[in-house]
Image: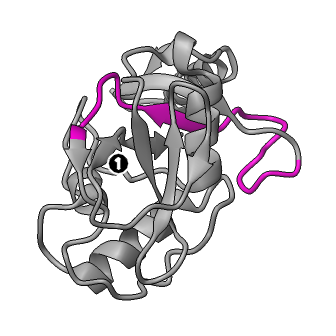
């Protein structure tokens, strides 16, 4: 028996509606997120605001922090004090900074490489937060949880010898020598 065209049209419409409904459910979940929620391999640590790179009024985007520190004391540099070009400090620049640091420093045991190599919660796109991204982690530390009271590295370089850190005891920011050993908490964007 020959199937009529409306039979195929009906199946196409049902399939299309199912795909649309699935897509909407994913978008609605992201729009329902609040800081502190577990999501996409970590904990929502910051939600972008109007004017920030990546902000979309129709769909929430932001920063997810790993649920625990990746190190309680590692250096920023691999021991070669070179300018990496990773000087951006704004929200949304940490990933590009991390890529630049790893490209210039190469393989080794240092903060950006540790984050770039991280495979956590089924995600492999972790990075060392920029200075401003790190500050948002500090602002929301009690909700995100698990932070030490010491200093944390950012991916924002000052010069060939220093990079920005932030203290999680009082919030002070500074730019010590890249050979110092400070904590690291990886983040990823959503």
Q: In the image as oriented, which residue stretches furthest toward the left?
A: 108
Front residue of 159 and 64: 159
75 vs 28: above or below: below
Residue drawn at 81 percent across, 35 percent down = 58
* Mark 1 secondary-structure assignment: loop
60 vs 43: above or below: below
Front residue of 80 and 8: 80
Front residue of 75 and 87: 75
Few, some or many residues within 10 Å of mark 1 (<14, 14–19, 20+):
many
Start-end of magenta stretch: 51-72
Is residue 9 in view? no
Is residue 45 in view? yes
Q: Residue 47: x and y, percent?
A: 68, 31
Q: From the viewer's perspective, tell me whether residue 105 is left or right of residue 63.
A: left
Residue drawn at 62 percent across, 70 percent down = 88
Front residue of 24 and 124: 124
Q: Quadrant of residue 2?
A: top left
The residue under label 1 is: 126
20 vs 124: above or below: above
Q: Residue 110: x and y, percent?
A: 21, 61
């Amino acid at each position: 028996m020959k199937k009529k065209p409306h039979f195929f049209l009906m199946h196409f419409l049902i399939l299309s509606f199912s795909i649309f409904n699935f897509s909407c459910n994913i978008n609605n979940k992201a729009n329902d997120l609040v800081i502190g929620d577990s999501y996409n391999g970590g904990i929502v640590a910051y939600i972008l605001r109007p004017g920030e790179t990546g902000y979309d009024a129709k769909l929430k985007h932001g920063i997810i922090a790993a649920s625990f520190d990746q190190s309680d004391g590692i250096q920023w540099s691999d021991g070669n004090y070179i300018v990496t070009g990773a000087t951006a400090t704004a929200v949304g620049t940490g990933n590009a900074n991390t890529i630049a640091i790893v490209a210039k420093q190469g393989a080794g045991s240092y903060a950006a490489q540790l984050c770039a190599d991280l495979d956590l919660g089924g995600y492999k796109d972790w990075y060392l937060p920029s200075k401003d991204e790190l500050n948002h982690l500090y602002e929301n530390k009690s909700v995100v949880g698990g932070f030490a009271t010491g200093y944390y590295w950012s991916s924002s370089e000052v010069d060939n010898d220093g990079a920005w850190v932030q203290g999680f005891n009082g919030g002070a920011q500074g730019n010590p020598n890249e050979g110092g050993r400070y904590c690291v908490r990886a983040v990823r964007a959503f």
